Image (spheres, grey):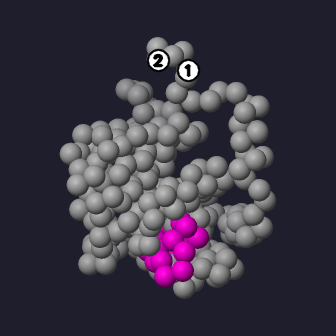
Amino acid sequence: MSSGKTYANTDLRIADYVESLFLPVDTILEAAKQRCRDASLPDISVNDMDGLHVEILALAAGAKKAVEIGTLGGISGIRIARALGEGGVLHTCELHERHAAVARANFEAAGLNDRIKLHVGPALASLETLSAEGPFDFIFVDADKTGYPAYAQWAASNLRVGGTLVADNTFAWGLVLQERIDNPDMAAAAKAIRTFNSYITSHPDFRATQLPTGEGLTVAVRTR
């Protein structure tokens, strides 16, 4: 860049400053994370800073109707549901009942059962039934990476004009540009994420950017 400024902050002191300032201790989220650990859920929930990004983006969108693809233990779902406020509804999709059980406990403990509807099963099947509930104000994607292109297409048809789409892990763990990846599952995931990013940036109905978080957070607004 001509200004000499980098795309991402690389100063760990600044990272510590930001986290200490913007992330006060949240006892509800800390308890939710402990339930996830106690249930031996995969340690792949959004980190605290990215969860805050998602919450603020939902607030900025003025969202009342939201969809989350990939519930896991409900950490990001709590963030999104809080942003919706009273009268808002979050539909969150989770493949595994074991994960969904933990999420239910976390949603109940957070006092958010009145604004969250949890759908268990393959995400695309759940999304097909949810189309009748749309259009939606906010969609967050953080599920199986090979499904990202299909989730993007669904979002393009079910997000309102002015609505926001957010997707996590869109740097593909640093592999998004790597042409040769020995692990076939990781190779398929990286390819799908490249397809997702290209689809969103080239779609005439979206204006998109990518926030340089540790995992990469793609953010797109439907403009027409």
Which stretch did the figure color magenta?
80-97
Q: CA distance from mark 1 to mark 2?
A: 7 Å
Judge whether residue 143 is colored magenta.
no
Residue in the image at 48% along x and 45% along y: 217
Judge whether residue 85 is colored magenta.
yes
User: To which quarter of the image does residue 67 belong?
Assistant: bottom left
Q: In the rendered image, is residue 224 in sight?
A: yes
Q: Is residue 205 left or right of residue 73?
A: left
Asked if labels 2 and 1 touch by Cβ distance under 8 angstroms, the answer is yes
Q: Residues within 10 Å of mark 2 (few under 14, many from 20)?
A: few
Q: Is residue 22 above or below residue 121?
A: above
Looking at the picture, how far across and down is residue 156, in whole percent?
26, 57
Q: Which residue is mark 2?
A: 1
Residue in the image at 28% along x and 52% along y: 223
User: To which quarter of the image does residue 213 belong?
Assistant: top right
Amino acid at pointer 1: Lys
Residue in the image at 44% along x and 72% along y: 64
Q: Which mark is residue 121?
A: none
User: To which quarter of the image does residue 102 belong?
Assistant: bottom right
Residue in the image at 46% along x and 17% along y: 1
SS at mark 2 in the image? loop
Q: Nearer the viewer, residue 35 or 136?
A: 136
Q: In the rendered image, is residue 69 in sight?
A: no
Q: Is residue 87 above or below residue 6?
A: below
Q: Is residue 78 above or below residue 108?
A: above
Looking at the picture, how far across and down is residue 92, in whole percent?
46, 71
Q: Tell me the quadrant of the picture where the C terminus can be found.
A: bottom left
Amino acid at pointer 2: Met
Q: Which residue is mark 1?
A: 5
Q: Nearer the viewer, residue 113 or 6?
A: 6
Looking at the picture, how far across and down is residue 43, in whole percent?
64, 55
